[in-house]
Each structure stands twice: as C-alpha cells, then as structure tokens.
Image (cartoon, grey):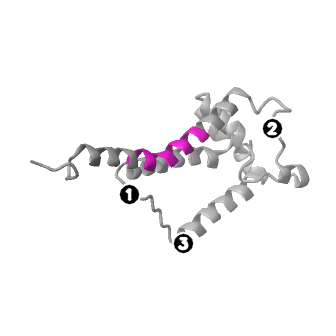
Amino acid sequence: MPGPHSDGSVLERRKDRAGRVRRLGTPLGILATVTAAFAYVGAVDPNDPGHYPVCPLLKVTGVLCPGCGGLRSAHAFITGDLGAALQANAIATVGYFLFAAVWVLWLVRAWRGKPLRIALAPAWWWGVGAVLLIFTVVRNLPFGSALAP
C-alpha cells in the first residue's frame, strides 16, 4: 500500500496540478491580453479617423512601414474578412497565424512541463529581416501598390 507521500498520492497530484496551473499562467495571460487587444480593435474600427494615432514614419516621411495597415488588418481579421486583412497588411495577417501556431505549441509544452525554446539560426533572423525590408520597399513602389493599405 502506498504511503501518504508516494507517487500517485493525493498530495503529489495536488502539487502537480498547482504546478501545471502556474506553468499555464503566462501563456493564458498572453492569450487574454491579445484577445482583449483584438476585441478592442474589432469593436473600434481603425477605418474611422480619430481613434488611433497615425504611423509616425508615414506622417513624417510619407513612407509606409512594415506595420502600416496592421490595425486595419487586425480589424478585418477579427471580423472575418481574411481578404481585406491580407490586403491591409499581408505580413501582419501571416503573423496572426504564426502567433497562433507558436502559442498552441507553447501551451502544449507548458502543459507537459517543458519550456518553449525556439532557437533560430542567425540565417533565419536575417531572412526574416530581408523579407520585412523587401515587403517595405515593394509596398512603397508604384508596382507594389497592391501591398499598400
């Protein structure tokens, strides 16, 4: 017969449950924050002027940054218009799906008691930077106007 502190005891199961709740706190907190932000952007349309500040780079230089159109993209995404979300900011829309995939991976690993470690080689970081730079340049050129919000 197992003792009070052996594997499978009520005390061990309670400790495991408390540890699991603690490990899930951060990913669930991040999800709550992102959900609240998307709910706000879904409720307050960025297409109506006066609710959100103008991009400082766009205001000063007239150049669209990689994030320009991100709020309109988020609004379209949250209201279910994927086409409009992609048209407003394709990079941001891809980022929403990427965030969701990484978040699910994080939640599963936290549930299992393992840390989330995403180690990308420097070449991948350079690649991400290059994609953002190319996206920014192309959306500011006449032939890339389809990428502009």
Tag 1: residue type?
Answer: Lys
| Of marks 2 and 3, the one in the foreground | 2
Please provide the residue range marked out in magenta. 20-34
Q: Secondary structure at mark 1?
A: loop
Label 1, on which residue?
A: 114
What is the CA distance from the residue labelled 3 to the residue labelled 1? 26 Å
**Residue at 42 percent of width and 50 percent of height:** 105
Write down the quadrant of residue 114 in the picture: bottom left
Label 3, on which residue?
A: 123
Please give left or right for residue 60 compared with residue 55 in the image. Answer: right
Give above or below for 66 relative to 35. Answer: below
Inspect the magenta stretch and tell me whether residue 24 lies in it.
Answer: yes
Label 2, on which residue?
A: 52
Q: Is residue 8 visible?
A: yes
Please give left or right for residue 143 compared with residue 77 in the image. Answer: right
**Residue at 58 percent of width and 29 percent of height:** 80
Q: Nearer the viewer, residue 59 or 134?
A: 59
